[in-house]
Amino acid sequence: MPTVAVNGAVLHYEERGDGPPVLFLHGTGASSFIWDRTVPLLPVGRRLITYDRRGFGDSAGDGARSLQEHADDAAALLRALGATPAAVVTQSGGAPIALRLTIAHPDLVSDLVMAEPAYQVLLHPSLSVSRAMAKTLVRWLVLRDPAGAAVAYYRWASRFTTGGNAYDGYPDEWRTTAIRHARATLREVLQLIPPGPRAGAVREISCPVTLLIGDISEPVFHRTTRRVQRLMPGARLVRVSGTSHLIPADQPEAFAKAVADALTI
């Protein structure tokens, strides 16, 4: 996997295909593995770029001090690869980063596709969210068990409202990687607490936007997705059946079709 040095970090990335660029920006706790089941299903005609954000997967460098730092990394990566403007495909905690990228660097983003954006989660309180945060923080800060805390968070975020969770069924390699960068995950969970970027800035985004929502995922992410839809009334909403919060991992065929339809590949 090639690398590029940006802003004091060394980011591992991979690309395939030719044509207008598409950047896949993973969410909290994941890495580029989240796209493994999706990218091969996309039709030809696009330059598909996946990468590990700093602190995640195989990318090196100090952990990001803010979500904006991740957005600036993405901007630097796109410029370094000569891949602008790019459509940005993201999920969960990657969405607030993609929004920041689009707000700060509108010339770099041609389209946004966001699966269940974890935007302003704490403005949508619920007993489930409160319990998950309490369990995660106790394991991390009281029991000094960051790996256990991260796994508790992963299982909650990937749970099905019909019972069980998707995380326990993912490949061992995925789970091993996710546990290895547990501290980066937990740091980012805290960074997601402030309700940014501000709603006014999100309303000003003018590029085409597609939102994806799972039908049996954690309800708080339905509410955050609807929140983004209200701020972006021109956004297209696509419902995906039989999936937890991690739509590209759970339903790669449906996710790939939604991306292809959004970008008219």
Image (cartoon, rainbow, N blue to C red):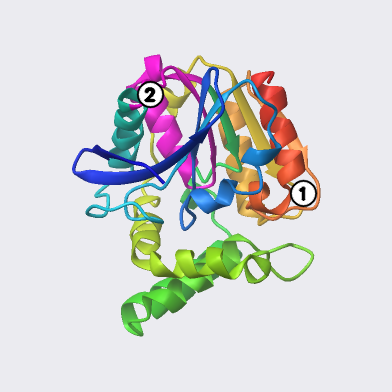
In front here: 188 or 256? 256
- Decide which of 185, 57 is in the foreground and name it: 57
Query: Mark 1 and mark 2: span between their CA atoms?
Result: 29 Å
Asked if 1 appears above or below 182 in the picture, the reply is: above
Residue 194 seen in render: yes
Q: Which residue is mark 1?
A: 215
Secondary structure type for disc 1: loop
**Dot 1, crowdedness within 10 Å: few (<14), some or many (≥20)?**
some
Rendered image quadrant of residue 190: bottom left
What is the secondary structure assignment of the residue under circle 2? Answer: helix
Mark drawn on residue 103: 2
**Image spot of residue 52 (x, y percent):** 41, 48
Judge whether residue 198 can be spotted in this image. no
Question: For the magenta stretch, what is the residue range?
Answer: 81-110
Q: Is residue 98 magenta?
A: yes
- Total marks shown come to 2
**What amino acid type is highlighted by mark number 2?**
Ile
Quarter of the image holding residue 260?
Answer: top right
Q: Residue 261: x and y, percent?
A: 72, 24
Identify the residue at horizontal 32%, vertical 49% (top origin): 54
Q: Where is residue 177 shown, x and y percent of the image?
A: 46, 64
